[in-house]
Image (cartoon, helix red, strand yellow):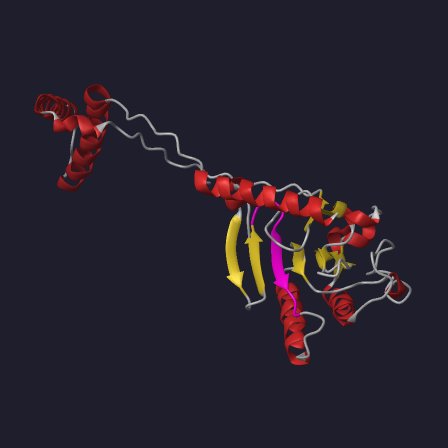
């Protein structure tokens, strides 16, 4: 899962449920759980594997508290068709890419019914080229990737569609959903410690000046104290030493300048990404 630094501050846990399912929980004034899933393919003959996947996903969704916003996104290898709308009008929206529902699609509909989820794509009318998410080697197009949302927040969705202009290094297209929910991080006060230029202590003259200044400040602070018992003396000495250290560092050493962090993406990575983009653009021109 990829998320911004702002979202990272709200992440409370990240859990692997199975080789095909993981979930990330976020705190804040509105709790949010995001599930990433990858279903077995429609052609997979192992029915037990499909049963286990959808059972695990259903149990996970049901286990999440009912007032938490739940989003489940991924490659479900599921085709949901318009013909399923009369039978499941609460689940299947009016703007599906396919006419017929396949086996995985029916399993996904059943999951939504039992776990209280809704597919996001059927709520919004878009051109057909904004609906399909995968093109096979024979140039056949399918809508296999879906974003599900807990039914309680279905009306909070503002859009859902597929994009061809965003390259994520996959043969599937990028699918995006917009939801109007405000998330705020509970602010906590962080103690900020100043970083002093301690490298200056390598100079013998600066070191002698530092020792003299620290001794004078500590003795001056300690002489002004009135101490009633031995335990209080220990605490007061520690407070005086801490204050004397900070004041001496500020006067003699000064604060160290912070270095600007380099970008987390290296030059080589950027070069390879541009090379990949040019190769893909060349392929798209020749294929059309």
Image coordinates for residue 82, horizontal then vertical, percent:
87, 61
- The residue at 13%/28% (across/down) is 202
Q: Is residue 260 left or right of residue 241?
A: right
Residue 27 image offset from top left, x and y in percent: 56, 49
Could one spot residue 26 in this view of the protein? yes
For residue 67, side relative to residue 232 (left or right): right
Q: Residue at x 55, y 53 (%)?
A: 1
The region drawn magenta spans 27-40
Q: Is residue 64 visible?
A: no
- In this orientation, which residue lies closer to the viewer: 192 or 88? 88
Tag count: 0
Residue 251 falls in image quadrant: top left
In this rendering, the answer to whether 157 lies above or below 224 is below
Residue 184 colored in magenta in the image: no
The answer to whether 232 is drawn above or below residue 217 in the figure is below
For the residue pair 272 and 48, the one nearer the viewer reads as: 272
Q: Residue at x 74, y 62 (%)?
A: 116
Of 220 and 42, which appears nearest the observer? 42
Q: Which image quarter: residue 275?
A: top right
Extreme front residue here?
286
Which of the two residues, 259 or 255, is positioned nearer the viewer here?
Answer: 259
Q: Is residue 255 left or right of residue 113?
A: left
- 91 displayed left or right of 65: right
Residue 36 falls within the magenta-colored stretch: yes
Task: Tell me residue 239's x, y (percent).
Answer: 22, 33
How far across and how far down the image is residue 71, in percent?
66, 55
Task: Give the answer, above or below, for where 131 lies relative to 91.
Answer: above
Residue located farthest toward the top when viewing the structure as drawn: 251
């Amino acid at each position: 899962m990829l998320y911004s630094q702002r979202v990272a501050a709200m992440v409370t846990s990240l859990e692997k449920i199975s080789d095909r399912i993981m979930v990330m929980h976020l705190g804040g004034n509105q709790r949010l759980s995001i599930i990433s899933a990858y279903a077995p393919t429609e052609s997979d003959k192992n029915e037990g594997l499909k049963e286990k996947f959808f059972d695990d996903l259903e149990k996970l969704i049901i286990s999440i508290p009912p007032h938490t916003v739940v989003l489940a996104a991924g490659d479900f290898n599921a085709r949901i068709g318009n013909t399923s709308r009369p039978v499941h009008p609460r689940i299947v929206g009016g703007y599906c890419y396919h006419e017929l529902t396949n086996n995985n699609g029916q399993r996904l509909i059943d999951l939504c019914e039992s776990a209280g989820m809704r597919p996001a794509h059927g709520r919004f009318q878009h051109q057909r080229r904004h609906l399909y998410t995968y093109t096979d080697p024979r140039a056949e197009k399918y809508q296999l990737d879906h974003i599900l949302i807990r039914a309680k927040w279905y009306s909070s969705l503002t859009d859902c569609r597929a994009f061809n202009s965003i390259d994520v290094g996959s043969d599937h297209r990028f699918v995006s959903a917009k939801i109007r929910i405000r998330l705020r991080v509970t602010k906590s006060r962080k103690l900020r410690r100043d970083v002093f230029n301690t490298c200056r202590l390598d100079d013998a003259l600066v070191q002698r000046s530092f020792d003299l200044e620290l001794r004078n400040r500590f003795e001056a602070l300690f002489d002004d104290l009135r101490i009633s018992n031995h335990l209080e003396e220990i605490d007061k000495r520690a407070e005086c030493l801490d204050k004397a250290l900070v004041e001496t560092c500020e006067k003699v050493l000064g604060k160290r300048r912070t270095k600007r962090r380099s970008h987390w993406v290296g030059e080589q990575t950027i070069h390879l990404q541009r090379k990949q983009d040019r190769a893909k653009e060349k392929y798209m021109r020749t294929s059309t």
